[in-house]
Amino acid sequence: MVELIFGLVVIVLAGWMIYKKVNATVALFIAGILLLFGAAIMGHPVLPEEATTGSIWLDPIKSITQSFINNLGNIGMTIMVLFGFSSYMTQIGANEVTVRTLMKPLSGIKSVYVLVPVIFIVGNLLSLVVPSASSLAVLLMATLYPVLKRIGMSALTAGAVIATTATIIPTPLGADNVIAAETFGIDLMDYVLKYHAAISIPTLILMTIAHYFWQKYLDKKNPETDDIDESKLTALREDLPPAFYGILPILPLILITVFGIFVKSINIGLVEITFISLIVTVIIEIIRKRKIQQVFDELMVFFKGMGNGLAMVVALLVAASLMVDGLKALGIIDMLTNSVKDVNGAGMILMFAFSGITALIGLISGGGLAVFYASVGLLPDIAHNVGINGVMLAIPMQLIANLVRSVSPVAAVIIVVCSIIGKSPMAIVKRTSVPIIVGIISTLVLSYVMFS
């Protein structure tokens, strides 16, 4: 009981720090250290006997080392390379070419409410290229928002649709999918196509319908006559590369699909595929610019992007795994599973519990992925002990972590949109709330029906 109380106090402390805008990585890292040293003080082994340092007081420090080593392996390298590639695509202008190319045909559609579902779907597809919700919002507000305003779409409708574009598109290039697939020992493409897509695609369809009717209803209820303030829009690049560059950001996706589905005889991973795509891009850049030194200088952005991936995601994984190790050392995970494994509907209880915590922290902090990263390592053991499919716990957490960002008034994507259209964050959240709530309910219901 002492262990449980101590563990809950530390978890609440971590949540409070995140609420107070302490970086999630730092908050989870501190929580993990406290849990590990707490376990040592209470006489619980922190490391297995074969891995111990020989001193129970030094074992928590070695646990930090092991966590870095484990997370800098396949998962960490994949995430860092993907971050680097995305950064390089932004540097050479390829990401913006892709966005402009896909958005250009939309300017020919004159019906405001036909555009609402179209923009939502196309915007989600663009998140394959620009995975950062706030970065994608900046691009769409600069390229698409002026067009939408000129054809008569209200600022709140346009802002709400753009604020919900980077949500739950199924992609093997997503860091959360890479981590989940590795954690459950499932092939990445299998996880994305058989599990994620089975829930996310129907959910996106329902959200599209909800967007259409909700925005139309609110526009009718509260007509808007605002003029666009173009001075607040981010300036677009004028030195964009040729149109064929638009294929380069999605080249890893094309190659992983080809090798994962059609050429299974070749065993090649996402890291290798991304490096192939990078090499192809560098060769094209050299041929086009004929300035090798400039191309090589710009290539450094790739390595800086890898560093950003390390700082933003891999470090978060290390901190999250430390907290998981601390909870396991205290025996809290065993307590949790033993208390619910014989309860009728244990799977549903756990699904709602994990998803609810994810949604709550996501609303408070502006993103729930920190909770997902912190918890995903627990799910296989908990699911096994309770006798349920771990994916039933993971998929709702993962999707809700991405969805809840669009209804958090402190999320970067909401702040970006409302600052440009000159509305309050709560005004945008009101517009995004119904589609996101529909998405969350759909995610929970479909996950339970399909995986229970």
Image (cartoon, rainbow, N blue to C red):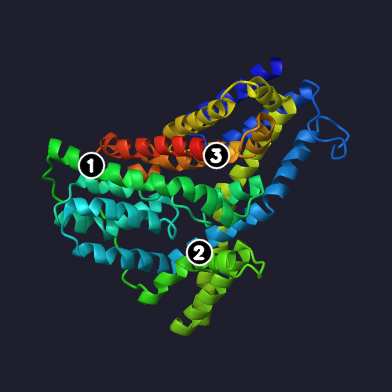
Residue 175 in view? no
Marks 1/2 in contact by CB < 8 Å: the verdict is no
In terms of depth relative to the viewer, which is nearer, 236 or 101?
A: 101
The amino acid type found where label 1 is placed reads Phe
Q: Could you say which disc has been placed on residue 184 in the image?
A: none
Instruction: Using the rendered view, name the quadrant where residue 148 is placed.
Output: bottom left
User: Going by the image, does 267 lie left or right of 406?
Assistant: right
Q: Front-most of 311 and 376? A: 376
Secondary structure of the residue carrying numbered label 2: helix
Give the distance between the C-alpha atoms of the residues marked 1 and 2, in whole angstroms: 33 Å
Indicate which disc, 3 or 2, sits on the residue closer to the N terminus.
Answer: 2
Locate the N terminus and report the quarter of the image it occupies: top right
Q: Distance between the residues labelled 3 and 2?
A: 27 Å
Residue 213 position (above or below residue 382): below
Within 10 Å of disc 1 (Cα), the crowding (few <14, some 14-19, many 20+) is some
Identify the residue under disc 3: 451
Q: What's under tag 2, amino acid-wise? A: Leu
Which residue is more in the foreground, 79 or 56?
79
Residue at 51 percent across and 26 percent down: it is 16
Label 3 sits on what residue type? Phe
State the residue at coordinates (43%, 64%).
90
Nearer the N terminus, badge 1 or badge 2? 1
Q: Which mark is residue 253?
A: 2
Quadrant (top left/top right/bottom left/bottom right) for the C terminus = top right
Q: In this view, does 441 lie to the left or right of 105?
A: right
Residue of label 1:
213
Q: Where is residue 118 in the image (x, y as percent from the top left)?
A: 28, 55
Q: Position of residue 36 (x, y in %)?
A: 72, 30
Q: Which residue is drawn at 19% across and 65% down?
A: 108
